[in-house]
C-alpha cells in the first residue's frame, strides 16, 4: 500500500545519508515513518540565522549553502543534513542556510529528532567540532557554538 511505499522510499533515501548509516535498519525505519518532505526554490532561505528553530533537515536533492557573516561556511549536496545545532543546544540558528537550486528536503520536528535520533546524537555532537574549526579558519566569531 501507500504507507509501505512511502516507508520504502524514505528508507532508501536514508541509507544514503552518511550520518544515519550507523543506525540499525529498525531505528532507521522509525525515522523514515516520521519524515515529512518539502521543496524549496532557488534562493529560498531554509534557515535564518538568529531565529528560533525546531526543524532538522536532510537534503535529498539539490544544492544549498550555509552562510555566516556573508561568507559561505559550508556547501550541501544530496545526503547532507543541517539544522541540528539549534535542537541539540537549544540555541538560535547559528547560520543561514540557502537553497542554491531547487531543493528537496525531508525534515523532522524537535520531538521526532529527540526521540528518533538519540542513537546518533553523539556523532552529531562530535561533528560540531568541525563547525568551530571552519569558523576559526575563516576568522568568524565562533562563540555562538561554544558550550554553554
Ligand atoms: P542550526 O544552528 O540549527 O542552523 C544553522 C545550521 O548551519 C546549523 O544548525 C548547522 O547545521 C549548519 N552549519 C554548517 N556549518 C556550520 C558552522 N560552521 N557553524 C554553525 N553551523 C553550521
Image (cartoon, rainbow, N blue to C red):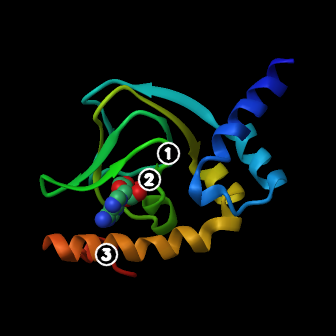
Q: Earlier in the sequence, mark 3 or mark 2?
A: 2
Q: Residue 83 carries which label?
A: 2
* Dot 3: element: helix
Residue 40 lies, in percent from the top left, at: 39, 27
Q: Quadrant of residue 33?
A: top right
49 and 5: which one is in front?
A: 5
* Residue 60 rendering spot, x and y as whole percentages: 52, 37
Estimate the spatial distance between the alpha carbons at disc 3 and disc 1, rounded to whole Å. 20 Å
Q: What element carries label 1?
A: strand
Q: Whole-percent x and y of residue 23?
A: 73, 60
Does label 2 point to a residue whose CB lies under 8 Å from ligand 1? Answer: yes
- Specify the quadrant of the image occupied by residue 117: bottom right
**Residue on which the image places disc 3:** 132
In the picture, measured across the screen, residue 141 lies left or right of residue 144, that is left
Q: Residue 57 carries which label?
A: 1
Q: Residue at x 57, y 45 (%)?
A: 109
Give the alpha-carbon distance from disc 3 to disc 2, as whole Å.
Answer: 15 Å
Amino acid at each position: 500500500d501507500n504507507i509501505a511505499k512511502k516507508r520504502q522510499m524514505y528508507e532508501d533515501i536514508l541509507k544514503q545519508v552518511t550520518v544515519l548509516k550507523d543506525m540499525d535498519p529498525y531505528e532507521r525505519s522509525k525515522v523514515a515513518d516520521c519524515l515529512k518532505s518539502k521543496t524549496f526554490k532557488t534562493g529560498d532561505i531554509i534557515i535564518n540565522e538568529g531565529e528560533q528553530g525546531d526543524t532538522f533537515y536532510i537534503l535529498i536533492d539539490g544544492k544549498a549553502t550555509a552562510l555566516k557573516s556573508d561568507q559561505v561556511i559550508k556547501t550541501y549536496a544530496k545526503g547532507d543534513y543541517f539544522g541540528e545545532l539549534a535542537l541539540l543546544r537549544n540555541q538560535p540558528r547559528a547560520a543561514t542556510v540557502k537553497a542554491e537550486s531547487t531543493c528537496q528536503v525531508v525534515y523532522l520536528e524537535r520531538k521526532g529528532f529527540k526521540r528518533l535520533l538519540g542513537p546518533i546524537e553523539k556523532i552529531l555532537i562530535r561533528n560540531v567540532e568541525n563547525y568551530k574549526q571552519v569558523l576559526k579558519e575563516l576568522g568568524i566569531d565562533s562563540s555562538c557554538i561554544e558550550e554553554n
